[in-house]
Image (spheres, rainbow, N blue to C red):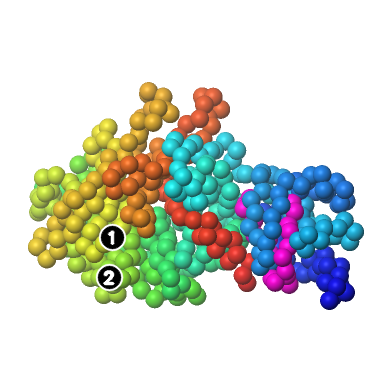
C-alpha cells in the first residue's frame, strides 16, 4: 500500500503538466480575478493549491512569494487573486506531501483593468448581501459588494463599442449578455463570444433589425430582444390633429401628400439557439389606428415628433404574458403570449384632440417593469416629467377587465442626497434605470442616468446596501458620478461559480 501511495505522489506533478484540461491553461491572460482552478484527473484526491505573485520558474523563489493557499478535494477550486495587470505562478501538491523535487510550476496573468479611472464607491456596506456581485454597465465591470472589480468583458470583441455597453447581465444558462450600439452579444466568463443574433431584417423588413435596449435569455435556451421597424408618421398640418402613422413603404413616402417623418416602431423577437425566429411581435399592429395617432408631443420645438420606441420588456413565463414599456408615451402594454394580443394598456391615453384622458400620469418615462405576485406589477418610474423629482419604485395592483387601471399599493422615493456631489450638480434620470425583485422580497435598483446609484431596499423602505459608480475627472480633479444605464445583481458566490465553470464546459 505504501508503494502505491508513493507512486501516486511521485507522478502527481506530471499529471498536472500533461493534462490539457487543467485550468487556467498555461500562459493564459484572464479578464477576471476570481479564477476557477481545475485538475480533472484528481477529483478524488485531497490537494493543496499554492499561488505566488510573479512569473516564477524555480521552487525556492516560488516558496517565498506564495500569497494564496487552499485545500480542495473534488479537483476544483475557486480562488481570488489580488490584482489585475499582474502575473501569477501556481502549483498543486497532495495534502501533506509537499516536496520541491519534480514539482511543476504553472503560469497565468490577469489583464489590466480597461479603465482605472472608474470605481464603485460604497455608500452603505452590507453584511446580509456580502456574498453578492453586481454587473455595472456604465463602468463595464462586475464588482463585489465591497466595490472591488473582479471581472470585465473582453474589449477586443469585433463590433464591440465599449462606451455604449448596456445591460450586462448573467443568464439562466450561466452566460453573460449585453448590447453595444445596435449589436448584441452573448459571451462566457472568459469573454469569448458564443452567440450573436442574426440581425438580418427578417422581422423589420429592412437590412437589419435595429437591436436596442434589452436582450434576455430564458431557461429553455431561447432569446428575446427588442428591435425596430421603419414607419412613416404624417405630421399634422395647421388644421389637422391626426398624426397618421404608416408602415414604411418607399412608394407611399414618395407619392403621399403632406409632410412625413420617418420613425421607428418597435418589434420584439424571439430566437432559438440556432438564430431562427420562433416568435415576433410588432407594435405597429397595435399603434396604427390607436389613440396614439392623435398624440401631439408637447415638448417645445419638437415639431410634433412622435416617439414610440420600446425601452424594456418582461416575459412572465408562468402567466404567458409580456409587459412592454414605452418611455415617451408613459405607457406599458400587456401582451398575451404567443397570441400577441394587447390585453391591457397602462399609463397615459389620449382623446381625438390629442389630450390626455387621465389628469395625472401614474408614471413618467419609466424604464423597467417586473411582475411580482399574481396581479401585482413593480415599475421603475424615472419621474422625469416633474423637474427636480427623484425616481420612484412603485408597486401597483392590476385591475383588469374594467378600464385597465392600476392601483398604487407601495412606493419608494429614491434618495439621492448622499453628499458626494457638488451643489451645482444637475441630476438627470431621463434615461436608464431598472429594478430586480429579490427572493427575500427586497428590491435591487439602479437609478440610471447621470447619477446611476445602486441600492438594495426592503419593503419597509430600509436601505440594506448602496453604492455609486464613479469616474475620475482629470479636468475637475475629482470623482464624479458615472452615467450608467442598468445594473444587474448576482445574489451569491454560487451564481458566480456557475459562470466560471460553464466558461470552459465545452
Q: Is residue 6 rendered to the left or right of residue 427?
A: right
Which residue is at the front of the view, 379 or 455?
Answer: 455
Q: Which residue has dot 1 on it?
A: 371
Range covered by the magenta-colored residues: 31-51
Q: Are marks 2 and 1 in contact (CB under 8 Å)?
A: yes
| Element carrying mark 1 | strand
Q: Is residue 30 magenta?
A: no
The image shows residue 77, relative to residue 446, as above or below, that is: below
Q: Position of residue 389 (x, y in %)?
A: 26, 35
Q: Position of residue 13 (x, y in %)?
A: 83, 65
The image shows residue 9, relative to residue 484, as above or below, that is: below
Q: CA distance from mark 2 to mark 1?
A: 10 Å
Identified at 87% across, 56% down, the residue is 100
Which residue is at the front of the view, 285 or 325?
Answer: 325
Characterize the local packing of mark 1: few (<14), some (14-19) or many (20 or more) Cα atoms within 10 angstroms: many
Please indicate, yes or no, whether residue 271 appears anywhere in the rendered image.
yes
| Element carrying mark 2 | loop
| Quadrant location of the N terminus in the rendered image | bottom right
Amino acid at each position: 500500500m505504501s508503494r502505491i501511495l508513493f507512486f501516486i505522489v511521485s507522478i502527481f506533478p506530471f499529471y498536472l503538466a500533461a493534462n490539457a484540461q487543467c485550468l487556467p491553461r498555461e500562459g493564459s491572460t484572464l479578464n477576471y480575478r476570481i479564477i476557477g482552478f481545475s485538475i480533472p484527473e484528481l477529483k478524488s484526491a485531497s490537494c493543496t493549491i499554492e499561488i505566488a505573485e510573479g512569473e516564477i520558474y524555480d521552487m525556492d523563489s516560488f516558496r517565498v512569494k506564495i500569497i494564496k493557499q487552499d485545500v480542495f478535494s473534488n479537483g476544483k477550486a475557486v480562488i481570488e487573486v489580488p490584482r489585475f495587470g499582474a502575473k501569477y505562478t501556481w502549483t498543486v501538491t497532495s495534502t501533506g506531501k509537499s516536496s520541491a523535487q519534480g514539482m511543476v510550476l504553472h503560469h497565468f496573468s490577469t489583464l489590466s483593468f480597461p479603465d482605472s479611472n472608474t470605481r464603485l464607491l460604497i455608500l452603505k456596506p452590507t453584511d446580509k448581501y456580502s456574498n453578492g456581485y453586481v454587473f455595472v454597465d456604465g463602468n463595464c465591470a462586475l464588482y463585489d459588494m465591497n466595490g472591488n472589480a473582479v471581472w470585465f468583458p473582453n474589449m477586443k470583441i469585433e463590433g464591440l463599442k465599449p462606451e455604449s455597453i448596456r445591460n450586462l447581465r448573467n443568464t439562466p444558462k450561466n452566460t453573460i449578455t449585453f448590447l453595444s450600439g445596435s449589436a448584441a452579444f452573448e459571451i462566457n466568463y472568459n469573454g469569448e463570444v458564443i452567440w450573436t443574433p442574426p440581425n438580418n431584417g427578417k422581422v423589420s423588413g429592412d437590412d437589419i433589425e435595429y437591436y436596442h435596449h434589452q436582450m434576455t435569455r430564458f431557461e429553455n435556451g431561447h432569446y428575446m430582444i427588442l428591435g425596430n421597424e421603419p414607419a412613416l408618421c404624417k405630421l399634422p398640418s395647421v388644421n389637422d390633429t391626426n398624426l397618421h402613422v404608416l408602415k414604411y413603404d418607399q412608394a407611399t413616402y414618395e407619392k403621399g401628400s403632406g409632410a412625413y417623418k420617418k420613425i421607428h416602431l418597435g418589434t420584439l423577437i424571439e430566437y432559438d439557439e440556432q438564430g431562427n425566429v420562433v416568435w415576433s411581435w410588432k407594435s405597429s399592429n397595435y399603434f396604427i389606428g390607436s389613440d396614439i395617432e392623435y398624440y401631439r408631443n408637447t415638448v417645445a420645438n419638437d415639431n410634433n415628433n412622435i416617439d414610440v420606441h420600446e425601452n424594456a420588456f418582461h416575459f412572465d413565463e408562468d402567466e404567458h404574458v409580456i409587459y412592454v414599456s414605452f418611455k415617451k408615451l408613459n405607457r406599458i402594454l400587456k401582451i398575451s403570449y404567443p397570441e400577441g394580443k394587447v390585453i391591457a394598456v397602462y399609463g397615459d391615453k389620449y382623446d381625438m384632440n390629442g389630450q390626455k384622458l387621465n389628469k395625472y400620469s401614474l408614471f413618467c418615462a419609466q424604464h423597467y417593469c417586473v411582475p411580482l405576485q399574481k396581479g401585482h406589477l413593480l415599475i421603475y418610474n424615472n419621474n422625469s416629467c416633474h423637474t427636480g423629482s427623484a425616481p420612484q419604485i412603485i408597486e401597483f395592483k392590476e385591475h383588469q377587465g374594467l378600464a385597465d387601471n392600476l392601483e398604487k399599493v407601495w412606493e419608494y422615493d429614491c434618495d439621492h442626497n448622499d453628499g458626494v456631489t457638488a451643489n451645482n450638480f444637475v441630476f438627470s434620470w431621463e434615461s436608464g434605470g431598472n429594478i430586480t425583485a429579490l427572493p427575500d422580497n427586497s428590491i435591487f435598483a439602479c437609478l440610471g442616468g447621470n447619477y446611476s446609484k445602486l441600492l438594495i431596499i426592503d419593503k419597509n423602505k430600509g436601505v440594506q446596501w448602496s453604492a455609486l459608480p464613479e469616474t475620475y475627472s482629470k479636468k475637475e480633479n475629482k470623482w464624479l458620478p458615472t452615467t450608467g444605464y442598468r445594473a444587474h445583481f448576482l445574489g451569491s458566490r454560487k451564481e458566480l461559480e456557475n459562470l466560471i465553470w460553464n466558461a470552459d464546459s465545452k
